[in-house]
Amino acid sequence: MVLFDPDFLIWIQRGNPKALKRITRTDSSAISVQTYLEFMHYARNKSQQRIIRDFFYEVGIPILPFTPNIGHRAMAYVDTYALSFGLRAGDAIIAATAVENNLMLTPGNAKHFQHILGIAVQGVPGLKTQLLSTDDDISPPTAWRRD
């Protein structure tokens, strides 16, 4: 099973073909409740919130909840990596969710997680540095459109 982080899903939302290919070829995937909360937090209105909820439901991506072990591990990650490598709280929670559930993490930017011991990270080649050109189709997947 693969855990996707918010940056990866943003690439999908922007229509990045590499990210779309990865998520459609992954048989079993999930997101952390942290990822869900970040997406809902940045929605500008109820319609966008509905689109986000519908997307996760239609694609069938389960949302993994916080557990005490995830909380404790995330605290340890922040204690260990926040000052030395700039690890943010949200990334610590996502990393802890991956490790506690024994999942491969597929982030939008693997550099956010490279210093964390014990985490399995599967980057998407070229994704973290690839910028969308004006020739790229940036229309979001149908489930994300506001029609």
Image (tube, rainbow, N blue to C red):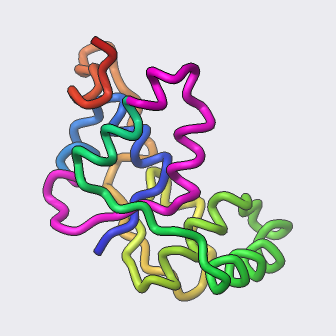
Looking at the picture, how far across and down is residue 86, in whole percent?
Answer: 76, 60
- Name the one closer to the observer, 97 or 117: 97
Looking at the picture, how far across and down is residue 93, in whole percent?
Answer: 63, 67
Q: In the rendered view, tell whether residue 118 sits above or below residue 15.
A: below
Residue 139 painted magenta = no
Magenta-highlighted residues: 22-50
> Is 20 placed left or right of 55 in the picture?
left
> Is 128 placed left or right of 140 in the picture?
right
- Name the one closer to the observer, 69 or 46: 46
| Residue at (23, 48) in percent of width and height | 59
| Residue at (44, 42) in percent of width and height | 129
Residue 35 painted magenta = yes
Looking at the picture, how far across and down is residue 104, in whole percent?
Answer: 37, 75
Quarter of the picture containing the C terminus is top left
Quarter of the picture containing the N terminus is bottom left
Looking at the picture, how far across and down is residue 141, in whole percent?
Answer: 24, 30
> Is 78 placed left or right of 125 in the picture?
right
